Image (cartoon, rainbow, N blue to C red):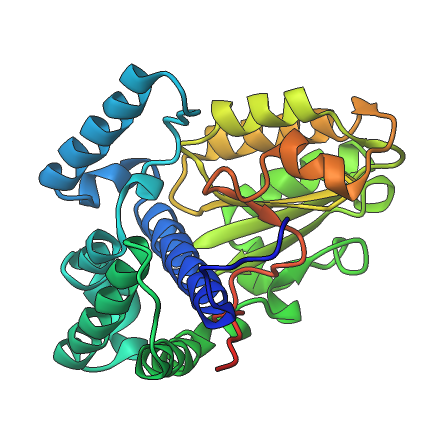
Amino acid sequence: MEKLILCNAKDVECFKALYEIESYIRLIVLWELKGNYGLSWKGVIPEELIREITKRQNQEIQLGCVEVNNSNLLSYLNLSELKDLLVNTDLWELSFRSYWGAQDIVLSDFKRLIAVRNKMAHFRSVSTRDVRLVNRFLEDLNYRTKNYDTIRNVWNRINKDNESDPPNKLYKFDFIKEFIGLIRKADAFVKNKVSIFLLESNWAVQFYVVAGSINGDEFINLIDKYQKIISICRIGSLGEKIELQFSRAIPLSKSIELIKDTLQLCVNTVDGISSMESIDTYKINMREDVIPWDLQFPCSSPIGFNE
């Protein structure tokens, strides 16, 4: 890219930080919605927001010059609307209030951040004070989301090392009993290094391919087929591993069907691809439910920003 003339370095860095903040908030809202409400998660979104999402998607379809992904519902909401989902729905009491603190303070923090966000959206240069506001929000966001760092606990995991004597905390679930039997039958605990984690309201299942990379078309077909079920998918930069996170509230039959199809996905591999190819092949960050493996989500806000 040519050297920027009318855009200051501070503007670029601030835009990047705001992009990451909005994307991260969208991610945690999506994860909490799908994890807590399972197949009925869309019902938590107010009807007026659903109508606005549909309207914006239809506008893009009519334009015919941009790619529309109907699965990316929350991507059609702006930061103010995402804030409303986080703070002004049942999700606030269920998932966020205990960690985010007083609602009026959170709303005030969002109000200031949104003012800077709107300023940048209209390509107006930011001031030092604007940058400080973004930095302060980031500091608070990191603190408010620290609870996610403790969720991925080895004591809530089953893999080849303990599948013969799984933790009672996990083995009490009917899904886990069926899952272990299925993975043992396929010898996938060893062959595909399968692991399963309990992540509060979600399960997370990891698979590694034996050789090559996951077939991109088959991967997208899998994500599309189970988009109502999958909360988040992490995928390796070479297509060599995958982690599916899905709600514990999903019916047992659907969860097992997802595991079977994912095992098949890890068998029908293609020749290895590069990390650059993988972004477009797997739609990493292009779909709101597909993120890079390096982001070990759920986690606290991974965003850093220097003034």
Reply above or below: 158 against 57: below
User: In screen coordinates, is 12 left or right of 156?
Assistant: left
Q: Nearer the viewer, residue 15 or 211?
A: 15
Which picture quadrant has residue 212? top right
Q: Nearer the viewer, residue 202 or 284?
A: 284
Q: Residue at x 31, y 24 (%)?
A: 60
User: In screen coordinates, is 48 left or right of 210?
Assistant: left
Reply above or below: 8 against 192: below
Q: Residue at x 58, y 54 (%)?
A: 171
Number of labelled discs? 0
Q: Residue at x 16, y 56 (%)?
A: 89
| Residue found at the far front of this picture | 5
User: In screen coordinates, is 14 left or right of 86?
Assistant: right
Question: Residue 166: x, y in percent?
Answer: 68, 59
Reply above or below: 228 against 171: above
Question: Residue 248: x, y in percent?
Answer: 43, 47
Question: Residue 211: x, y in percent?
Answer: 89, 34
Question: Residue 22: x, y in percent?
Answer: 37, 58
Q: Residue at x 31, y 77 (%)?
A: 130
Reply above or below: 150 against 6: below
Q: Nearer the viewer, residue 7 or 226?
A: 7
Q: Nearer the viewer, residue 201 or 47?
A: 47
